[in-house]
Amino acid sequence: MIIQIASAFFATLFFSVIFNIARHHLLYCGITGAIGWAFYLTSLSHTNSVVFSSFIGALAVTSVSQVLAKRKKTPVTVFLITGIIPLVPGAGMYQTVYHILIQDYGLASHYGIQTFQIAGVISIAIILLDTFNKLIYQKRQ
């Protein structure tokens, strides 16, 4: 589990470099991705549901991104876009196309549906917390 979390940290960090994130934010981007992946793995070990675990991981990434954005006075997207990278269902997309190519349409549809579900719950988690954050901010004013 520690190796996976460290891998998520470095993957996020290197994607942050590719996305030209400012140097003083790189460490925080890596930490955001690692936290999201840690929540994903913990949830997966308890629920055995990739979709639900992706939702939990996305909630964690979004929460951390919002906190860091306020503390570092930078847009949320700096931490959110890079932090979500480990959760993006790239393997599911690959499996979908692979099974289409070998004409195993049953597994292709399984992986395709699961990939869309994961992408959907990641979007829902981001929208949910963003809306919640805006409601709280409006109530304070």
Image (cartoon, helix red, strand yellow):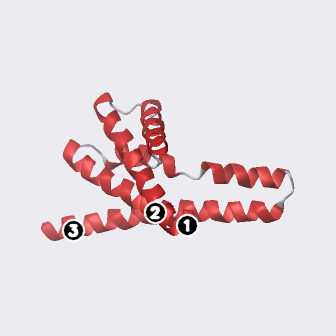
Residue nearest the observer in this picture, 74 or 50: 50
How far across and how far down the image is residue 139, in percent?
A: 17, 71
Splitting the image into 4 quarters, where does residue 82 fall?
A: top left
**Label 1 belongs to which residue?**
49
Residue at the location (62% across, 59% down)?
A: 115
Label 1 SS? loop
What type is the residue that disc 3 sits on? Answer: Ile
Q: Is residue 106 above or below residue 9?
A: below
Mark drawn on residue 136: 3
Residue at the location (76% across, 60% down)?
A: 108
Residue at the location (48% across, 39% down)?
A: 7
**Label 2 belongs to which residue?**
43
How far across and how far down the image is residue 55, in percent?
A: 46, 63
User: What is the residue that sits farthest to the right in this orientation?
Assistant: 103
In the picture, measured across the screen, residue 93 lies left or right of residue 75, that is right
* CA neighbours of label 2 inside 10 A, class few (<14), some (14 to 19), many (20+): some
Looking at marks 1 and 2 on the same chain, the residue that comes earlier in the sequence is marked by: 2
Q: Is residue 25 above or below residue 124?
A: above
In the picture, measured across the screen, residue 59 lies left or right of residue 103, that is left
Looking at marks 3 and 2 on the same chain, the residue that comes earlier in the sequence is marked by: 2
Residue at the location (49% across, 46% down)?
A: 85
Label 3 SS? helix
State how many labels appear: 3
What type is the residue that disc 1 sits on? Answer: Ser
Q: Are marks 1 and 3 in contact (CB under 8 Å)?
A: no
Q: Are marks 1 and 2 in contact (CB under 8 Å)?
A: yes
What type is the residue that disc 2 sits on? Answer: Ser
How far across and how far down the image is residue 121, in percent?
A: 50, 65
Label 2 SS? helix
